Image: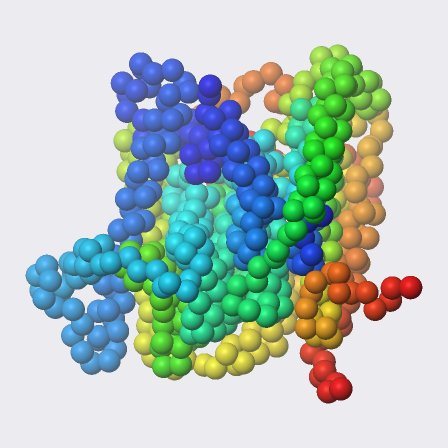
Amino acid sequence: MATKRNAIGILMGVELVLNGANVNLVAFSHYTTLGIDGQIYSLFVIVLAAAEAAVALAIALNFYNNHLTIDVDRANRLKG
Amino acid sequence: MFLTLASQSVPELLDYFAPQWLQDTASEGWQYVGAALVHMALLFGVFSLCPFFLIWLERKVAGRIQDRLGPTRVGGRFGWLQSLADGIKLIQKEDLCPPAADSMLFNAAPYIVCMSSFAAFIVLPFSEGWVAVAADCGLFIMLAIMSLEVFGIILAGYSSASKWSLFGGMREAAQMVSYEIPMAICALIPVVAAGSLNLGEIGDMQSGGIQNWFLFHDPFTFIAFFVYFVVATASCKRAPFDLAEAESELVGGFHTEYSGMRWSFFFMGEYASMFAVCGIASILFLGGWNTGLQGIDEILSTMRAGDNAGSYLAGVLGVGIFAAKAAIGVFIQVWLRWTVPRIRIDQVITVCLKYLVPISCFLFLGAIVWPLILHKGLGDRTTWNEPLGERVAEAIEGGRTVTTVLERDERPGQSDAHSPDHGPDADSKDEDEDSVSATQFDHSLTLYPAEEVSR
Amino acid sequence: MNGDSLFFTLFAFMACLGAVAVVVSQRMVRMAFWLIISLGSTAALFFLIDADFLGAAQLLIYVGGTLVLLVFAVMLTSSGPYLNIETSPGEIVMAAMLGLLFLFMVVSSQTGIDWNGTNQQMAAANGMTGEISTFDSGSEGNTLRTIGMSLLGLRPDRGAAETGQLHTGYLLPFEIVSVHLLVVLIGAAYLARAKRRRDT
């Protein structure tokens, strides 16, 4: 995630991280007494990740429309 | 993935597929592996031959519709070996990869398409209890796996570095993604009627006569079947929705650059997914492996009850009936392809988003409200046939699977793990003394043994 | 080595391989492809651990939905035939250090906890008595009904029989998420709508 300058690349990194967290949630709840809790948490994580991806991609498209690039370093218009 | 999933439900299959010496000599783990391998080989054999047959069928039907003869030479009078000859030709062809293409993705894309449409058969039951994985959310898994197919197509279109491919891939992706929505909603309508996502259970509920098929369950499921069929045709990218490979505009669409076996993988995937969606339609709406004639169904279910050659024979018959129903669906898709002209891409998307999605949402709502209206208005839960819950209970009682599964499931902790399963459910539902919730409660009780079976 | 652990090893390896390849590869579409491999193997791991509903949801929502969106966005925003990302060596070093730091953190916290003791404590907190089994009805596969009940606010796997009271489920989060999804749908459609760029 830290090496990418492309907005969509960063988004993919975020998805990976969330996915890793999901694996942890499911695995730990499976081997402890938590039962179904971990699975439900990861369901929420999946759904929220999908929502987040949709909004982020919409922003990226919008950014591309205005700047013809999605390099996040170029988004410095608001820099003080 | 297939083997893993298959090994979860293998004990049921063991009765059928593993030979006796294997059961005697091998340890339990190896029995799993053996049965899974046998089953996998059977499935793969049948379903790699299935596209060959369907391609031949398509060419013959197309020929007849266009007043031609179709293939006549190879393999006797009807040209029934034509597909085999084509297959041999395709294997011999050179496997080309355009120099501008992204070779890794270009090579991987056909496998994704083929794998995802064949993997859907993991959870598709072919006859009562004849399923690789009797998952509780079988329909959900099946739709999920089939939604992966679009990836291979996008990657194929993008990595070919050709504008025809790119256009075809993008059209295809837009079409498949948007048609997935009404398809899932339409598939949910009989699920609402059945109260289960388990394809095996849904099939069992429809035994005992044609009036028990979900097609005739209520008016909403009746319409939903036709909507589902249209949507399924579109999601298999068949004409009149085959914009992705519109030969007159896009050369060959997303597979313009492909040749030889990789090209044929796309077609095998397409025909396999045609069969899969028609299989779903036949289980959800058309009674699956049940004949629809009450007498024959009863005979078959008594045959299934035993654990002998008769039950095996009944299973084989069920597979035949199921495959015949699905094949009729495929035939209608072929028929449509050669009689209806192709529509434009904007029309495709308009039809989906402006008409099919609202229609299917309306049908979904209607299917939910229908039992309530019936109950409030007529005091009866269904129009003319037996209530579903009782049918489920019958199907479970009479089924062969119950005894074997229950015997196997006598592990400690199983039964008491389940008793709280319905405790809170019953408590809360009883509090409001609405007749509606009473029916639901009834339903959940009758469905309870079904949960056991699917293990 | 039995079948389960064999497949666990295979899919875990594939998931890790895909994850590393996502980070390492330079082409955007290849990154998406490796992400498919990684997420798909994760779904297979979920199937292995008897979370069948979750695995299917992962396939349907993540792989079939989110990643298709991602690939679309890659295509729509790429200026050349293949979009490449150049990374300077300094960034790679910094990112590798950061990653290793996180790995060290995870491993040290993993090894520093007495899992059995925690399990006992959790069981006590949940009001469970007697033999602690790591397999209950919720984790035995076929989690569909349990998950559905939990999302409706009931917990069939946390029995009322033992403690005499109902455990609360996830009705409120479920409702919030559904409203959230609606908001996201409208918001994303608003943000991504086709605008005519002003010629300046």
Q: Residue shown at 43%/53% (left/top)? A: B104
The residue most toward the top is: C130
Look at the image and tell me whether residue C177 can be seen: yes
Instruction: Say which quadrant the C terminus of chain C sits in.
Output: bottom right
Where residue B270 appears, as percent x and y from the top left, is: 38, 60
Residue closest to the far right: A80
Left or right: B297 as drawn, with respect to C82: left
When asked about the image quadrant of residue C102, the answer is top right
Percent position of residue A5, x then y: 69, 56
Q: Which quadrant of the figure has residue B131?
A: top left
- Residue at horizontal 54 percent and vertical 39 percent from the top: C17
| In front of the other: C31 or B417 | C31
Residue found 83% across the figure and 69% down from its top: A77
- Judge whether C191 appears above or below B138 on screen: below
Vertical order, B364 against B247 (above or below): above
The residue located at (34%, 16%) in the rendering is B26
- Position of residue B325 measured from the top left corner of the image (x, y, whole percent): 35, 57
Residue A35: x percent and y percent?
70, 29
| Camera-nearest residue between B396 and B38 | B38
Is residue C44 in sight in this rendering?
Answer: no
Is B69 left or right of C16, judged from the image as shown? left
Describe the colour scheme in one phrase: rainbow
